[in-house]
Image: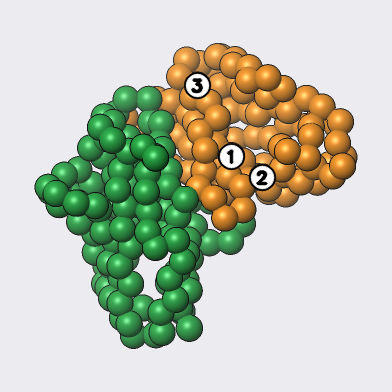
Chain colours: A orange, B green
Amino acid sequence: TQLLEQSPQFLSIQEGENLTVYCNSSSVFSSLQWYRQEPGEGPVLLVTVVTGGEVKKLKRLTFQFGDARKDSSLHITAAQPGDTGLYLCAGLNTNAGKSTFGDGTTLTVKP
Amino acid sequence: NAGVMQNPRHLVRRRGQEARLRCSPMKGHSHVYWYRQLPEEGLKFMVYLQKENIIDESGMPKERFSAEFPKEGPSILRIQQVVRGDSAAYFCASSPLRGTTGELFFGEGSRLTVL
């Protein structure tokens, strides 16, 4: 069973601060996705990373895929209250055709 | 709305009753996945289906749970003789092709409460 560990589990910060959340595994993934989920809603895809060492930016969010494709990080610059939510990473096992999800990081950004 | 549609959004059942959750995938998507989520936790894989086929049901409890994706109509997750521990949010996701980038498109979930 492929496991993804996300850290920290909970994070509460003030508006304007920077933060990084992590997604780690001992397994290699074909690709990795980051999703954000708000209360009462389904997860929404933020980004897909495929190549080891890849860095993608989405406005104030920077995503990095580890060189060995086993881990990833999400960095948010100058966090805003609208960034509040549950951030989930998911790794794809191509052979199995299904994605494994981490338990998520619950982010609260206080105004 | 061309997104993944789930219904009902909320369902209340008493212990021993049956729950049926429905999911219509995004247009053009032939792969459906069901996940279960407890409060402040991640998504736990339950089952992966294509039209008329169960591809992987390794996350489904051995008893009381079943899923189908018929040739016509939505995918259905069925829970028989519900117990309180079945209370959770059940999410359906769809994708266009197997083994591509892994991107999933989720519905808004069905929240089951067992009294």
Please give the residue where the numbered disc 1 appears in the rendered image. A36
Chain bearing mark 2: A
Residue B77 percent across, percent down from the top left: 29, 61
- Frontmost residue, A84 versus B84: A84
Q: Residue at x 39, y 40 (%)?
A: B1
Q: Residue at x 37, y 59 (%)?
A: B7
Asked if B71 appears above or below B28 in the picture, the reply is below
Residue A76 percent across, percent down from the top left: 73, 28
Question: Nearer the observer, disc 1 or disc 3?
Answer: 1
Residue A62 percent across, percent down from the top left: 66, 21
The Cα–Cα distance between marks 3 and 2, rounded to whole angstroms, is 21 Å
Residue at disc 2, secondary structure: strand
Asked if B98 appears above or below A86 in the picture, the reply is above
Please give the residue where the numbered disc 2 appears in the rendered image. A85
Q: Residue at x 42, y 47 (%)?
A: B107
Residue at disc 1, secondary structure: strand
Horizontal side of residue B59 vs A13, given as left or right: left
Please give the residue where the numbered disc 3 appears in the rendered image. A49
Asked if B19 appears above or below A20 in the picture, the reply is below
The Cα–Cα distance between marks 1 and 2, rounded to whole angstroms, is 6 Å
Residue B30 percent across, percent down from the top left: 23, 37
The answer as to whether the residues below labels 1 and 2 share one chain is yes
Visible in this render: residue A76? yes
Chain bearing mark 3: A
Question: Nearer the observer, disc 3 or disc 2?
Answer: 2
